[in-house]
Image (cartoon, grey):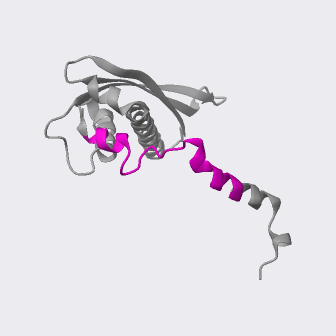
Amino acid sequence: MPSFKKFPLAGWGLLLSLTLLPGCGYQPLHGANTPAAQQLPLVQINNIPDRLGQQLRNNLIDKFYRDGRPASPEYTLDISLVPNVYKLGIALDDSATRAELNLVANYTLRNMQGAAVLSGTTTSVTNFNILSSQYATLIGERDAYDRSVVQVSEDITRRVSLFFNRDPVTASAQ
C-alpha cells in the first residue's frame, strides 16, 4: 500500500486542480469536435507573395486542412508579410555580429460576402549570428526565417481558431 506521506504537497495541488479543471469551463481549442475544427477547413487561404509567403501558406494549409482543401469555402484569409532585418551586434571593426529578424504579418479573414470578420497583426522576432563564414551566416538567417514563419502560422491559426470557438453561430452567420 503506498504511503501518502511520500506524496508531496505539490502533487496533491496538481491532482486537485486537474479534478476541478472541467468545472471551470475549459474547452480544448483544437479538438476533433470543436467549432474551430469544423470551421478551419472552410477557410480558403489565398496566395501570399514571395518564397516566404509560400512557406507561410503551406504551414497554414497543413494546420487548417485535414481532409484536403475546401470545395466550397465560406471564408477567405488574406495575409501580407513584411520582413525586416536589423543589425544589432557591432564588432570593433564596425562589422555586424548579430542580427534580428522582425516578421510582421497582417491578416484579414473575410466571409463570402467580402466583409472582414477578423483582422489583426502578428509579429515574430528571431535572432541569428553573422559569422565570418558566409555560408554559415546564410544558414543561420534561413533558420531564423523558418522559425519566424512557424511562429506566425501558429499565431494566426490560434487567433482564427479562437474566433470560431468564441461564438460559432455568429461566426458562421457572418
| Residue closest to the far front | 23
Q: Is residue 11 left or right of residue 59?
A: right
Expressed as whole percent of the image width and height from the top left, the position of residue 100 reads: 54, 31
Span colored in magenta:
15-41
Question: Between 40 and 145, which is closer to the camera in this rendering?
Answer: 40
Question: Between 84 and 106, which is closer to the camera in this rendering?
Answer: 106
The residue sitting at 45% across, 35% down in the picture is 155
Q: Quadrant of the C terminus?
A: top left
**Which quadrant would residue 72 be assigned to in this image?**
top left
Work out whether 68 lies above or below 152.
Answer: below
**Which quadrant would residue 160 be assigned to in this image?**
top left
State yes or no: residue 164 in magenta: no
Q: Quadrant of the N terminus?
A: bottom right
| Residue closest to the far bottom | 1
The residue sitting at 47% across, 46% down in the picture is 28
State yes or no: residue 33 in magenta: yes
Residue 84 visible here: no
Q: Is residue 57 left or right of residue 161?
A: left
